[in-house]
Amino acid sequence: MRTPLIAGNWKMNGSVALINEFGQAFSAAVSPTSVDVVIIPPFPYLDAARHAFEGTVLSLGAQTLNPIHSGAHTGEVSGRMLKEFAVSYVLVGHSERRQLYKESDEQIFARLLAALSVDITPILCVGESLEERDAGRTMDVVLRQVGYVMSRLEPDQRKQVVIAYEPVWAIGTGRTATPEQAQDVIAGIRAYQAGFDKGLAEQLRLLYGGSMNASNAAELLAQPDIDGGLVGGASLKIDDFYAICQSA
Ligand code: PEP
């Protein structure tokens, strides 16, 4: 059985005060334990989070990493550095990085390899734009993004990847994919993986992301192939995020 995973991507939001509030709200005594819960704050909050999340069910994630370990790359942060702050997950290929920072599949793959090299679980984000969906190209786009990365990995590396299907038109728009739309694409990703390795396909954790909130999470998470959520806006509100974790 796949353990559900709920990851909260704070993007460029939050504060040390909010980190501390999450640490208090998610104490191990009161939180759901049958689900892995990750908070992904901006870099400057990682140290505060590492302390505030001690003894809670919360793990720590980062929003990106540089493909190399160290060097003359002003403004960048490496996987090795993240590891020192107890980071166990990192986003790669988020649509905001693909669009705003023009990250290519090749760069995304390099970042993902860097994460694996320091034993941080990469959450690979994939998803189509509205134009691509309207043109009937959703599966082509998504499987190309997934295939670019997964086909270049060794079998034991593939097992360590989490994939989040995030339709670009649903991110931060308040417009969620229907549970059927999300299930169809995510089942397609699993079937694609099963073409190479059935055992791996069964183990792979596949998330949905895109305007998931306390009201729609239960229905999305009830779909057979959806193993959790990547949550943006709603992960900044303790009650909503807590409710999503309870639905998983
Ligand atoms: C995201 O940023 O990955 C995301 C899914 O955002 P939102 O939940 O706000 O749509």
Image: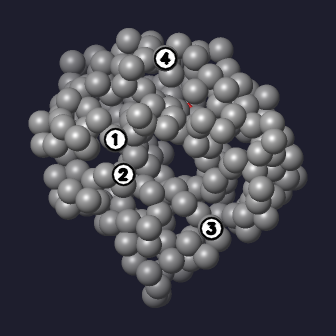
CB at disc 3 and ligand 1 closer than 8 Å:
no
Q: Position of residue 147 (x, y in %)?
A: 19, 45
Image quarter for ligand 1 equals top right
Helix, strand or loop for disc 2: loop
* Residue drawn at 75 percent across, 50 percent down: 56
Q: Nearer the viewer, mark 1 or mark 2?
A: 1
**Residue annotated with mark 4:** 222
Helix, strand or loop for disc 1: loop
Helix, strand or loop for disc 3: loop
Task: Check the image and tell me how it is coloured.
Answer: one colour
Amino acid at the residue labelled 3 = Ala
**Residue 86 image label:** 3
Q: Position of residue 241 (x, y in %)?
A: 70, 32
Helix, strand or loop for disc 4: loop
* Residue drawn at 41 percent across, 34 percent down: 1
* Residue drawn at 77 percent across, 45 percent down: 28
**Residue 161 image label:** 2
| Real-space CA distance between mark 2 and mark 4, rounded to the nearest whole angstrom | 22 Å
| Nearer-N-terminus badge (4/1) | 1
| Nearer-N-terminus badge (3/2) | 3
**Residue 191 image label:** none
**Residue annotated with mark 1:** 204
CB at disc 4 and ligand 1 closer than 8 Å:
no
| Nearer-N-terminus badge (2/4) | 2
The total of numbered circles placed on residues is 4
